Amino acid sequence: MLTMRPPTQAAVLRFIQSLKDTPFTYDQVGMTTEKSMPSGFDVDKYQKALGHGAETYNKAKDCIRRWLMFPPEMATLFWPDQSILVGAEVAVLFRAGPLWSLNPCRIVSRCEDEQSANQIHRFGFSYGTLAGHLECGEERFTVTWSPIDDSVYYELLAISRPNHLLTKLGYPYARRVQARFRRLSGESVSQAISCAATAVCRR
């Protein structure tokens, strides 16, 4: 949804409620959990080291639960108190030049502190795009902890393609914005963990 002004909270609420039971804007629902990537989509993987140990991992999990991976200088999430539940809908507000873009998504899957075959702990979720989103596809936000070297990482996997005339015509610009979002997302998680340790946080 594109608007000339930032939407009111009431307008956002009505918009999200209107999306109940609407289909995703793509057929490959759950593709961020598959080993093979679909054709026709851009696949972007981002990883940021957060530190070491169980304490850092638990703080990183809390960041995901509280949606703190959304950089406030780029995005406003509606609503940040939404629980990570499969089927829940949220919307992300971006500034797109002179316009405001409200992009709706629905949570597709979540992993609750699962362990892989190599014993790496993983926590996070994926969401997919709904009608009105400028892009089409899924994003997966996860944190991992490896007992092998005790390292903790934040990972973002985005599988997308343009879903609006603006993002098709402005494809190079849209790709730069996506790359900036991934980088700032990692910095947001890292900063949230640091301020949790000092009990001082910007939000």
Image: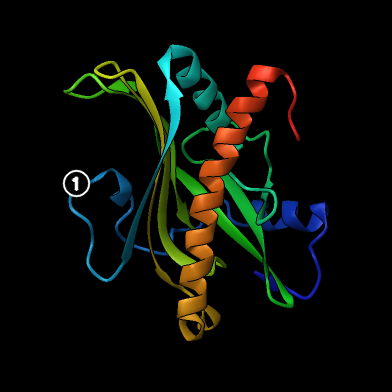
Q: Is residue 80 left or right of residue 109?
A: right
**198 up-or-down from 106: above or below:** above
Q: Between residue 77 and residue 27, name the one nearer to us.
A: 77
**In the rendered view of the protein, which quadrant contains the C terminus?**
top right
Point out residue 181 in the picture as x, y percentages from the top left corner. Answer: 54, 56
Residue drawn at the location 78% of the way across and 58% of the way down: 11
Residue 192 can be seen in this image: yes
Label 1 Cα crowd, 10 Å radius (few <14 / some 14-19 / many 20+): few
Indicate the secondary structure of the residue bearing disc 1: loop
Quarter of the image holding residue 63?
top right
Name the colour scheme: rainbow
**In the image, residue 135 above or below residue 110:** below
Residue lying furthest top: 54
| 8, 14: nearer the viewer | 8
Q: Nearer the viewer, residue 49 or 10?
A: 49
Is residue 66 visible to the viewer in this orientation of the structure? no
Q: Left of 20 or right of it: where is 162? A: left
Q: Position of residue 62 (x, y in %)?
A: 56, 24
Name which residue lies at 51% across and 26% down.
60
Q: Which residue is mark 1?
A: 35
Residue type at the position of mark 1: Lys
Q: Position of residue 183 (x, y in %)?
A: 50, 51
Residue at (40% x, 32% y) in the render? 153
Residue 102 located left or right of residue 87: right
- Quarter of the image with the N terminus in it: bottom right
Look at the picture and state if 127 lies above or below 94. Answer: above
Instruction: Report x, y in % for residue 90.
Output: 60, 47
Residue at screen point 81% across, 70% down: 5
Q: What is the quadrant of residue 48 in the picture?
A: top left
